Image (cartoon, helix red, strand yellow):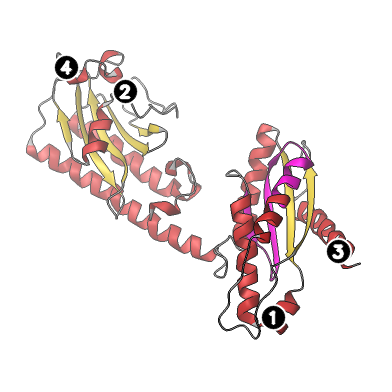
Amino acid sequence: MVMLKTIDWLTQDEAMQVSLDKWQRVVDLMTNLLGATAGYVVEYNEKFGYRAALTSRNPENPYPTVSGKPQSLDSNVYCRKVVQSKANHYESDARGKPEWADNPELIEDGYISYFGLPLLWPNGVVFGTLCVFDTKPTGYDQTQKELMEVFRDLIEADLRLYEQFEIMRTLSMSDPLTGMNNRAGFELLAHQKIRIAKRYHHNIGIIFIDLDNMKHWNDDYGHAAGDAALRAVGDAITASIREVDICGRIGGDEFAVLGYVRNRGDLTTIISRVRNALGQVKLTVPTSKSPIRETPQISSGASVFFEPLDKSLEDMMAVADLEMYRDKRSRQK
């Protein structure tokens, strides 16, 4: 399931807000019951490291707010041992132990005791850890350890619910033929991109792409061939855009791309890549009415909207759509 995750840190997803409120109460309660200095939910990202998602709000906690800055993957923090082993780890007193000699939580923060449990997705992939820290030695008994496991189970139950929600959200936002975003999915992501662009003063670029002669593909080769041509265009677009761009099939034979750009040249480059990719396509459709001896051709339109962005997404898409139809008419002459 974790492949459905669309942002680096899951706890920044607005859909997680209700769960985070519950997790905050869990962290506060477990910290108080164990008499610990601080409690945390730590999220793990295999590329960026370890990031405190929530911290306890008890008076003893020296860091009552999370910074959002991750600890690197190679940092010898306590949670790394839990993530690597996928097992509980209890350190009652880390002082003088060689394995923690360079642990910044011990050296800089004075956390000499740690108890952490792995938080796992239903398929066993590590989400992060649930943990408590203390500036004094501890002696947690079996009942306290089992209590922590109950708290862990509550959080993992929410991860299962999120997984189910994300599957449903993905299905509702995806085009079944091409696997791309459908119009609703594209517009949802586009609105998010535009909000970020306004905040950080980025320019927005939009490309409209249309499969030429869709009726010809369906009438002369059959609907299976028409579907194959649409999938080929979708594949070419997906392979040609940058990692930060979004794309989708927004209508029968229409596709769109949106991303941050410097100028129109960035969009022209993407369109050229799409055309080059399509030029290599050799469609084979066993149920075709006749042998297919051509590759899908496209018309395209591109527009750049410079900051400050004062147009709505709908207006931006209308401009790019108009450019695409101009290109289509010029190609038909």
Tag 2–tag 4 contact (CB < 8 Å): no
Residue at disc 1, secondary structure: helix
Q: Earlier in the sequence, mark 2 or mark 3?
A: 2
Distance between the Cα atoms at labels 2 and 1? 67 Å
Residue 255 visible in rendering: yes
Residue at coordinates 71% horizontally, 83% vertically from top-left?
A: 220
Who comes first in sequence, dot 4 or dot 1?
4
What residue lies at 20% left-to-right and 27% top-to-bottom?
114
Q: Using the image, determine if residue 150 lies above or below residue 324.
A: above
Q: Would residue 216 be found to the left or right of residue 227 on screen?
A: right
Q: Which residues are magenta?
A: 245-271
Q: Secondary structure at mark 4?
A: helix
Whether tag 2 and tag 1 are in contact, CB under 8 A, the answer is: no
Residue type highlighted by circle 2: Asn
Is 260 covered by the magenta stretch? yes
Identity of the amino acid at label 4? Answer: Pro
Residue at 50% over, 47% down: 14
Residue identified by numbered label 2 = 61
Residue 144 sits in which quadrant? top left
> In this rendering, which labeled residue sits more in front, label 4 or label 3?
3
